[in-house]
Image (cartoon, helix red, strand yellow):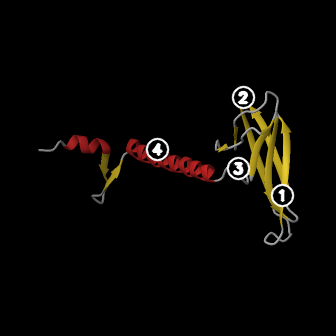
Amino acid sequence: MSNDTDRMAKQVRDSGGRTRLTGGMRILQYVVGAVLVVALAVTSIGWYLSAHPGGTRFESCHWEGSDLVLGFTYGTGDTVRTQVNPQGEDVVAQLRVDEGGGNHTTQLLTGESRFQISGGPHPVRYPNGAELNCPVR
């Protein structure tokens, strides 16, 4: 034996005999849908950021005393920007290469940036948290 009053509290029959959700159930349906969309967006952004460290990866990294030396490659006509930001015990390093109109397949150029970091060697990572292997030389 079923209790028809439970069903009536959540659904209402219209004149055509069809049932429709009441206001509270309709709002709950939208809230659950919105939560699922937000969760999917956050997960997608997390996967994207873990796959893209916020720029191009460095070719090399090492410490010479308190100097952080970062090596990279680029093509003719490219604009290269290196950025280093000490954050607590870590150093966050980022490389941006804006491709120019030059030939990128036949001529590969190498570059190096040096940054003096107070306190000597610290762990180095990309903005997304991935670590760089930077030995002391």
Residue 29 at x, y percent in the picture: 41, 47
Residue 111 at x, y percent in the picture: 85, 54
Query: Which of pointers 1 and 3 lies earlier in the amino acid sequence?
Result: 3
- The residue beneath circle 1 is 110
Q: Residue at x 60, y 49 (%)?
A: 50
Nearest to viewer (mark 4 / mark 3): 3
Q: In the image, is residue 33 above or below residue 101?
A: above
Q: Secondary structure at mark 3?
A: loop
Instruction: Please name the amino acid that badge 4 sits on.
Output: Val
Mark 3 vs mark 2, CA separation in Å: 20 Å
Query: Which of pointers 1 and 4 lies earlier in the amino acid sequence?
Result: 4
Mark 2 vs mark 1, CA separation in Å: 30 Å
Numbered badge on residue 54? 3
| Within-10-Å neighbours for mark 2: few <14, some 14–19, many 20+ | few
State the residue in front, 37 or 6: 37
Q: Is residue 46 left or right of residue 89?
A: left
Instruction: Please name the amino acid that badge 3 sits on.
Output: Gly
Mark 4 vs mark 2, CA separation in Å: 40 Å
Nearest to viewer (mark 1 / mark 3): 1
Residue 88 at x, y percent in the picture: 72, 28
The residue at the far right in this view is: 77
Quadrant of res 18: bottom left
State the residue in front, 134 or 33: 134
| Labels 1 & 3 near each other (Cβ < 8 A) | no
| Within-10-Å neighbours for mark 4: few <14, some 14–19, many 20+ | few
- The residue beneath circle 4 is 31
| Within-10-Å neighbours for mark 1: few <14, some 14–19, many 20+ | few
